[in-house]
Amino acid sequence: MTGPFFHGIHRSDDDRLRHLGELQRTQVAAGYPAQFNFLYQSLGILDAKASALLTFNGIALAALAIWMEGSAKGGQHMLLDAAFLLSLVSSGFCLSVNWIRWESTDELADEKAHAVTLLALRDSRTRHYRSAWLLAALSVVLVFVVTLWHVNDMRAQGWVHAEGSCGCATQPAAPVLEK
């Protein structure tokens, strides 16, 4: 089994022991902790941010699905469709940021190449996160525009008006129970 799905997964105890030996060797090598701790912390920050944005996108997608099924018509519906698609693509970028990647034993053996690989990974995941964030922000802008449009339409139809002018803000009277 090869490919990115199986990268860094060890198939035998001998492979695992060799990997642990390289890991221990690199942990005590001069300069390793500060450089690699920084890179791993950066990747951890990206993972946390992408997870939070993925949660936000999930809530936005659920709300958009409900709104699109309800009162949105015509151009409003098309803009909500676009916002929905932007949130979906944003979620895809977030998922690519949170992809699990384990170092191979050979990568651990070459400290310089390992650092370059981690930095390239951080750069790639940063681009994906920023793309996800921009798409989510654009989705929010579209939802804001549709909300303003929708409220304006409701106001024009007389559904939104000054509080209390029609008595709609008052609570309905409780039914009288017969004895």
Image (tube, rainbow, N blue to C red):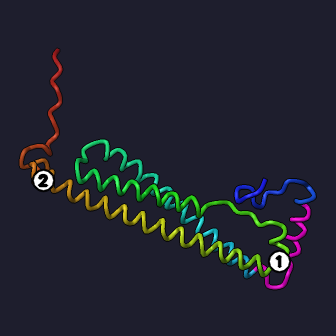
The residue most toward the left is: 165
Left or right of residue 100: residue 48: left
Q: To which residue does mark 2 refer?
A: 155
* Residue 114 in the image, given as x and y percentages of width and height: 76, 76
Q: Main secondary structure of the magenta part?
A: helix
Category of crowding for the residue at label 2, using alpha-carbon neighbours closer than 10 angstroms: few (below 14), some (14–19), many (at least 20): few
Residue 54, disc: none
Residue 34 occupies which quadrant of the picture? bottom right
Confirm whether the magenta stretch covers residue 30.
yes
Residue at figure coordinates x 43%, y 57% from the top left: 87
The residue most toward the right is: 14
* Residue 22 in the image, given as x and y percentages of width and height: 87, 71
* Residue 125 in the image, given as x and y percentages of width and height: 59, 69
Report the quarter where the C terminus lies: top left
Left or right of residue 34: residue 140: left
- Residue 124 vs residue 43, the one in the foreground: 124
Residue at figure coordinates x 46%, y 67% from the top left: 133
User: Please, what is the three-letter code of the amino acid marked with disc 1?
Assistant: Asp
- Residue 177 vs residue 67, the one in the foreground: 67
Q: Which residues are magenta?
A: 17-33
Left or right of residue 139: residue 40: right
Q: To which residue does mark 1 refer?
A: 110
* Residue 36 in the image, given as x and y percentages of width and height: 73, 77
Q: SS for tag 2?
A: helix
Q: Which of the two labelled residues, at mark 2 and mark 1, occupies the earlier sequence position?
A: 1
Q: SS for tag 1?
A: loop
Residue at figure coordinates x 31%, y 58% from the top left: 143
User: Please, what is the three-letter code of the amino acid marked with disc 2?
Assistant: Arg
Q: For marks 2 and 1, give the CA distance.
A: 67 Å
| Residue 101 in the image: above or below residue 59 | below
Confirm whether the magenta stretch covers residue 28.
yes
